[in-house]
């Protein structure tokens, strides 16, 4: 399968939350804890916000380096900042 | 070449002759090469354009020679005439003789003036490509020429093998293609003549090295034999010609070939055989089986002879003991292998031959295992063997064969029908009638006496229905099983995506949506990694918060606290605002309490 090096921007995105995935993930990480009923939606919101931040940061990085494409370096740099910021 | 040029300054007959001789000696090898190459080219490249270019090239050379000679010397003209005449006569006679053709070459080599070349060929240029015009110029330096020619030669040799096959396949096509190029110019006609003559002559010399000897000759025979077979078939079964031909006309050609060939092959040799073999059964009509054996014995040698007809050596093998056949095997082992490949094709004769040869060694084993063999060559061989070794058993065998044929389908049965010469023939034909009435009926009528037919029909029609019933019973069962089982099977092993990966993939998509820019695939992988890490941290934090509150359940408050600490939720931007901004309505309804009818609030707070 020939994978193109670049991925074009998504025009449409499912807004549905992968609730099952989030629940499973939490259960796998913390099997002794229980996620309350609507907790997964909030986790999804949290992830969404994180991704949003990360994407914006990466985009800023790409624009600073005058690059039309977000590269791995940009994402790494952005992740460094955002992961630190989103530490609780 | 410098030596040649110096004498040119002195326009005497002696010098001219000397020069010619010198040049001839020096250049003969080169010329030969060029000749061969030109001939090969003509051989190789049927397209008229290529040939034309070569011809034009040659003519251009000649013209240049003529122009040069006229321009320089009166003697030069004489020499040019001589040279022109000699090549024509020689070429008309034979192109192969190299020294004579070489005479033409020296001039092209000697020619010092590029200008006349360019001017005169320019007329041709329209039809030619510039490259080919340049070639004669390149040739003059003898040192360069051999290298170029040598390299060209190799390539052409490689192509030759391919081309030879084509030539041998379709020998008619060549002359047609060759002729047109000669027409356009009278001057080029001579050259074209040479070329055309060369083509037929060259192949012999080339053929002997043995580039592609075995397949072409045999195949050519096959094609011819096929047609002959068909014709003979029709001839042999003269009374039933109508029956035969009607199906031929109606049916698609492929099917006809497949069906008829097996019959036709035996018939080819057969047509005479039938006459011989038929008389045998008549004398002994008392015992059906006895007659059968009788007939088979009588017919066997004839059959063999027929099958051997294609090759002159074969009859000897056939008539004599098997040892001689083995010797034949030793002689051409390649052929047997090649024949196997060919066996699939319509012309079955080679395969038949092979079977004759190869069968011999197998004989001891095959006597036991003939019935099991479903292979075509094997069957043929088995047939032969049966003729020799198993004559008494034949009736039984034939019945078994019928069963097999039913199982295997039409093809094998048809091929078995090739043995038609034997007593099995009628049986097979009867079978064929069941399967397909057309050829079988003709065969029956032509080959087998009527009383035999009747008896054998009685014998073999009985097993046939049973076998057919078995086929019917077996076939439906299998499909049912196949249909029922495979579906669940296919459903079960469906490759499952890693759920973790899938969930992360969802967020990477979101990332590419939020980024609003094209991005590298590696960057997406990086995002996945980051997200994985982030989720880990998030779970750890939630655990800490829940533990701090003395709970084992993570509540929305913990998440709100988390978001507050992350700076997502501030005094200005509450959690509900974020939810309203980022989540669709269905999730918002789950999170943000709202009053519903009946004085109820959902979700309850």
Image (spheres, coloured by chain):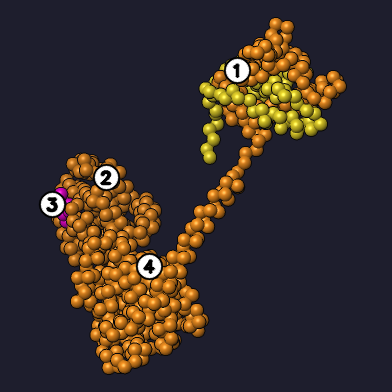
Q: Position of residue B360 (x, y in %)?
A: 45, 82
Q: Secondary structure at mark 4?
A: helix
Pointer 2 chain: B
Q: Which residue is mark 4?
A: B410
Which class describes the residues within 10 Å of circle 2: few (<14), some (14-19), or many (20+)? Answer: many
Q: Which residue is mark 2?
A: B133
Pointer 1 chain: B
Label whose residue precedes the other's in the sequence (2 or 3): 2
* Real-space CA distance between mark 2 and mark 3, rounded to the nearest whole angstrom: 19 Å
Q: Which chain is yellow?
A: A
Q: Which residue is mark 3?
A: B186
| Residue lying at 49% horizontally and 75% vertically, measured from the top left | B372
Label whose residue precedes the other's in the sequence (4 or 3): 3
Whether A47 is drawn above or below B326: the answer is above
Q: Are marks 4 and 1 on the same chain?
A: yes
- Check the picture and name the quadrant holding the C terminus of chain B: top right
Which class describes the residues within 10 Å of circle 4: few (<14), some (14-19), or many (20+)? Answer: some
| Residue lying at 75% horizontally and 32% vertically, measured from the top left | A27
Pointer 4 chain: B
The magenta-colored residue range is B182-191
What secondary structure characterizes most of the magenta part?
helix
Is label 2 in contact with label 1 (beta carbons under 8 Å)? no
Is label 2 in contact with label 3 (beta carbons under 8 Å)? no
């Amino acid at each position: 399968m020939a994978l193109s090096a670049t991925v074009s921007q998504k025009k449409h995105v499912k807004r549905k939350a992968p609730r099952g995935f989030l629940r499973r993930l939490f259960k796998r990480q913390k099997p002794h804890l229980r996620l309350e009923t609507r907790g997964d939606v909030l986790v999804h919101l949290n992830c969404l916000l994180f991704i949003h931040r990360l994407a914006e940061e990466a985009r800023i990085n790409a624009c600073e380096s005058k690059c039309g494409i977000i590269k791995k370096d940009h994402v790494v740099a952005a992740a460094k900042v955002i992961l630190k910021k989103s530490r609780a | 070449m410098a030596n040649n040029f110096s004498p040119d300054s002195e326009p005497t007959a002696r010098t001219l002759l000397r020069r010619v001789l010198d040049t001839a000696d020096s250049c003969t090898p080169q010329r030969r090469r060029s000749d061969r190459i030109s001939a090969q080219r003509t051989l190789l490249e049927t397209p008229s354009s290529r040939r034309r270019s070569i011809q034009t090239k040659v003519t251009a050379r000649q013209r240049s020679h003529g122009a040069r000679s006229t321009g320089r010397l009166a003697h030069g003209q004489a020499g040019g005439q001589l040279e022109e005449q000699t090549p024509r006569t020689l070429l008309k006679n034979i192109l192969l003789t190299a020294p004579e053709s070489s005479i033409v070459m020296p001039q092209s080599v000697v020619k010092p003036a590029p200008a006349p070349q360019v001017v005169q060929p320019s007329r041709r240029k329209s039809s030619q490509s510039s490259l080919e015009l340049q070639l004669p110029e390149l040739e003059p330096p003898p040192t360069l020429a051999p290298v170029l020619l040598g390299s060209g030669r190799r390539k052409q040799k490689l192509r030759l093998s391919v081309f030879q096959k084509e030539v041998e396949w379709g020998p008619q096509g060549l002359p047609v293609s060759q002729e047109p190029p000669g027409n356009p110019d009278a001057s080029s006609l001579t050259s074209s003549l040479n070329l055309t003559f060369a083509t037929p002559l060259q192949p012999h010399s080339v053929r002997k090295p043995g580039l592609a000897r075995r397949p072409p000759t045999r195949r050519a025979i096959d094609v011819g034999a096929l047609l002959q077979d068909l014709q003979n078939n029709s001839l042999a079964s003269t009374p039933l010609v109508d029956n035969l031909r009607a199906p031929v006309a109606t049916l698609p050609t492929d099917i006809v070939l497949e069906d008829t060939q097996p019959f036709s092959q035996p018939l080819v040799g057969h047509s005479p055989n039938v006459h011989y073999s038929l008389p045998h059964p008549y004398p002994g009509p008392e015992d059906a089986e006895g007659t059968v054996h009788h007939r088979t014995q009588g017919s066997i040698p004839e059959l063999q002879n027929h099958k051997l007809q294609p090759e002159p050596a074969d009859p000897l093998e056939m008539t004599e003991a098997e040892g001689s056949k083995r010797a034949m095997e030793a002689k051409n082992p390649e052929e047997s292998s090649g024949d196997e490949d060919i066996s699939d094709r319509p012309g079955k004769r080679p395969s038949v031959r092979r079977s004759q040869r190869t069968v011999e060694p197998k004989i001891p084993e095959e006597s036991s295992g003939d019935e099991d063999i479903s292979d075509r060559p094997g069957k043929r061989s088995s047939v032969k063997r049966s003729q020799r070794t198993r004559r008494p058993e034949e009736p039984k065998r034939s019945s078994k064969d019928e069963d097999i044929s039913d199982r295997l389908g039409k093809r094998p049965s048809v091929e078995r029908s090739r043995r038609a010469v034997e007593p099995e023939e009628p049986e097979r034909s009867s079978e064929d009638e069941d399967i397909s009435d057309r050829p079988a009926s003709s065969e029956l009528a032509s080959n087998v006496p009527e009383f035999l037919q009747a008896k054998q029909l009685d014998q073999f029609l009985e097993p046939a229905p049973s076998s057919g019933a078995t086929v019917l019973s077996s076939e439906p069962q299998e499909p049912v099983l196949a249909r029922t089982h495979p579906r669940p099977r296919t459903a079960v092993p469906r490759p499952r995506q890693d759920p973790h990966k899938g969930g992360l993939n969802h967020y990477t998509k979101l990332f590419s949506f939020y980024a609003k820019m094209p991005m590298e695939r590696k960057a997406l992988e990086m995002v996945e990694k980051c997200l994985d890490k982030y989720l880990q941290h998030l779970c750890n934090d939630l655990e800490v918060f829940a533990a701090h509150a003395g709970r084992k359940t993570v509540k929305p408050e913990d998440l709100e606290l988390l978001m507050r600490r992350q700076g997502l939720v501030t005094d200005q931007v509450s959690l509900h605002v974020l939810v309203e901004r980022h989540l669709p309505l269905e999730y918002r309804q789950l999170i943000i309490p709202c009053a519903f009818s009946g004085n109820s609030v959902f979700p309850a707070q």
